[in-house]
């Protein structure tokens, strides 16, 4: 039996939804340093730094960190104290420790290249489902949808989905919806477009619905919720 979508976007309109969001992203995306590369190492570093940290705060740390550790091999062989020194100010230092542990595994087990296989990426220290999907889709164009807080909020509003989005059953349903909605020919841009929409327009408070490229499909807006 086919899975029933909770988003209420008619299958015949899914392509139009994808085109509108991707067109909006192409014209309105923020110019961020990690968007100027397809290098999986650079993208991975940005994703780890962006966890629980604002974009504006990350940029100078990202640029300084990569100037010191321009390749995964440099990060793997560095002294841990040096890595933590270049992380100082970002907080959540376990992220930096796991980053170096993963770098050592990438050098030792994957010939210095971030693995392309989802399960291999997921096995690295500090890499969860979101980070694995983000790096593989953006760097390698693997057809994997991401689900973070921004994307979950966008999906919930499109489908007028109520409740605790982090509840395990609902989160799994949202993961399935994200994967079903994915623009498989351009998964990297699609995932970034969904996150950008949530970060800039479909914000937790005072969403800017009048500027949203996909507002016509949003059930929450139609219901005034």
Image (cartoon, grey):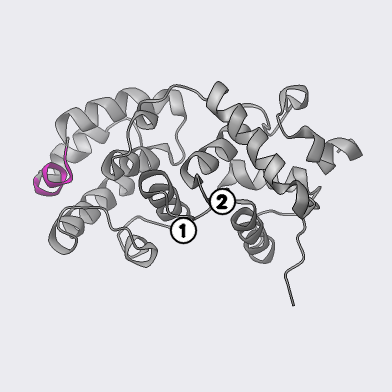
Taking the spot 62% from the left edge, 53% from the top edge, the residue there is 178
- The question of residue 76 being in magenta is answered with yes
Taking the spot 18% from the left edge, 45% from the top edge, the residue there is 72
Outermost residue, right side: 223
Say whether marks 1 and 2 touch (CB < 8 Å).
yes
Where does the image place residue 119, in percent across and percent down from the top left? 37, 67
Q: Earlier in the sequence, mark 1 or mark 2?
A: 1
Disc 1 from disc 2: Cα separation: 8 Å
Q: Nearer the viewer, residue 104 or 212?
A: 212
Q: In the drawing, does residue 15 fall left or right of residue 220?
A: left
Report the quarter where the N terminus lies. bottom right
Where does the image place residue 90, in percent across and percent down from the top left? 35, 33
Q: In the drawing, does residue 12 fall left or right of residue 178?
A: right
Q: Which residue is mark 2?
A: 147
Crowding near the residue tagged with mark 1, few <14, some 14–19, many ≥20 C-alpha atoms within 10 Å: some
Q: Is residue 38 visible?
A: yes
Circle 2 SS class: loop
Q: Which residues are magenta?
A: 71-77
Q: Which residue is mark 1?
A: 129
Location of residue 83 (image quadrant): top left
Above or below, 63 against 77 in this view is: above
Where does the image place residue 224, in percent across and percent down from the top left? 89, 35
Taking the spot 49% from the left edge, 23% from the top edge, the residue there is 30
Location of residue 45 (image quadrant): top left
Q: Overall secondary structure of the magenta stretch?
A: helix
Circle 1 SS class: helix
Where does the image place residue 23, in percent across and percent down from the top left? 60, 30
Report the quarter where the C terminus lies. top right
């Amino acid at each position: 039996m086919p899975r029933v979508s909770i988003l209420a976007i008619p299958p015949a309109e899914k392509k139009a939804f994808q085109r509108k969001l991707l067109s909006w992203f192409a014209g309105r995306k923020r110019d961020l340093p990690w968007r100027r590369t397809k290098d999986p190492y650079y993208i991975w570093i940005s994703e780890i730094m962006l966890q629980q940290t604002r974009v504006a705060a990350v940029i100078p740390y990202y640029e300084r960190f990569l100037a010191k550790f321009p390749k995964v091999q440099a990060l793997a062989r560095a002294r841990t104290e040096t890595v933590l020194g270049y992380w100082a100010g970002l907080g959540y230092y376990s992220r930096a420790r796991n980053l170096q542990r993963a770098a050592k595994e990438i050098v030792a087990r994957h010939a210095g290249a971030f693995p392309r296989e989802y399960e291999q990426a997921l096995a690295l220290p500090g890499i969860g489902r979101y980070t694995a999907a983000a790096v593989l889709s953006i760097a390698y164009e693997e057809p994997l949808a991401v689900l973070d807080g921004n994307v979950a909020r966008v999906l919930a509003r499109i489908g007028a989905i109520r409740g605790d989005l982090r509840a395990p059953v609902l989160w799994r349903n949202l993961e399935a919806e994200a994967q079903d909605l994915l623009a498989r020919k351009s998964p990297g841009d699609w995932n970034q477009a969904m996150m950008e929409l949530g970060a800039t327009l479909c914000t937790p408070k005072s969403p800017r619905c009048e500027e949203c490229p996909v507002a016509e499909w949003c059930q929450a807006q139609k219901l005034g919720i």
